[in-house]
Amino acid sequence: MSELSYIMIIILLAAALLVVLADSRNPKKTGKKKTGLKTGIIGAMDSEVSSLKEAMADRKTSSVSGMEFCEGTLDGHDVVVVRCGIGKVNAGSCAQLLINLFGVDRVINTGVAGSLDAAIDIGDIVVSTDVVQYDFNLTPLGFVPGEMNSPAVKSFLSDEGMRKSVVKAVRESAPEIHVFEGRVCTGDQFVSSREKKESIRESFGGLCCEMEGGAIGQVCIMNNTPFVIIRAISDKADDSVEMDYAEFEKAAAARCAAVTRYMITH
Ligand code: SAH
């Protein structure tokens, strides 16, 4: 064979290799959406994220600050799903890690909550318009309850587009479920008395109480990252709470995760 033939064969082999490489990165073959957003999904407890993790493809897990971040795709959409643990510090650091280390474009907090409103029953869904940290208190210095000085806000506003997509997701995927849009109230406390429930409701006018959303909202606003909180009601946050919470936590958590999945993938 002549020297020219060898060169031609090498060129052809190199071209074939390039075609194979390009094809393996084809979004259709990898299941990844070409121009989609990367969504961070935070739940405080396993029951709130396990069904999402199980439904993921191309999974890669990494452990940071004691939290397991599960990267991959959900029906072809890029997601990072993580259980942050209960409470504001866990939730806030988790949101910051999702933004800094995993480069998410937006954040969803899925989970269960106590109802603050007589019209909102166990199994109903609340989607955040905004979120307030009801236990943040600078009132002796002239601030209103929950008002912060840095960032200087009274509450953290959710992304309107994400909120509308969640409401649409509930209406399309589970029209029998009642969905409410309004304020979520967050504090480092499990609310289980009528007095506490009423005092939060009177001061903040929220629809539900939980222990993570306000920290996630704060971190997202500080980083210009859109967020929404989706909560299924597990209890009434009053003296009936212990019985109800134990009975309904798992079903409410799974319901909320199903809405989250539908919202991302439709
Ligand atoms: N079952 C857990 C404890 C759950 S704490 C354990 O044994 O480890 C309650 C969780 O559900 C929190 O993540 C909080 O966000 C939410 N939640 C549900 N009902 C609540 C209520 N009445 N008050 C505050 N948080 C509530």
Image: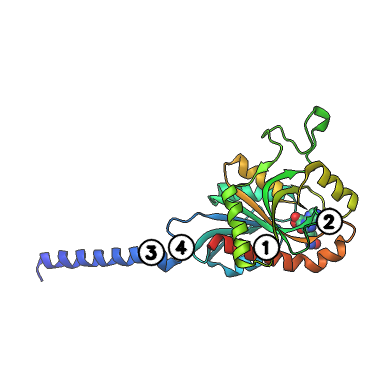
| In this picture, residue 144 sits left or right of residue 162 | right
Q: Residue 32 carries which label?
A: 4
Q: Which residue is label 3 attached to?
A: 26
State which tag comes first along the sequence, 4 or 2.
4
**Amino acid on which the number 3 mark rests in the picture:** Asn
Query: Secondary structure under badge 2?
Result: loop
177 horizontally vs 73: left or right? right
Give the quadrant of residue 241.
Answer: bottom right
Look at the numbered discs 3 and 2 and tell me whether their residues touch, using CB distance below 8 Å: no
- The circle on residue 237 is 2
| Residue labelled with disc 1 | 256
Q: How far apart are marks 1 and 3 (CA)?
A: 32 Å
Amino acid at the residue labelled 1: Cys
Q: Distance between the residues labelled 3 and 2?
A: 49 Å
Q: Are the two marked residues, 1 and 3, in contact with CB atoms closer than 8 angstroms?
A: no
Asked whether the viewer can see residue 60, the reply is yes
Q: What element carries label 4?
A: loop
Q: In the figure, residue 121 lies in which quadrant?
A: bottom right
Q: What element carries label 3?
A: loop
Q: How far apart are marks 2 and 1 (CA)?
A: 18 Å
Q: Mark 4 Cα within 10 Å, few/some/many (few <14, many 20+)?
A: many
- Which is nearer the N-term, disc 3 or disc 4? 3
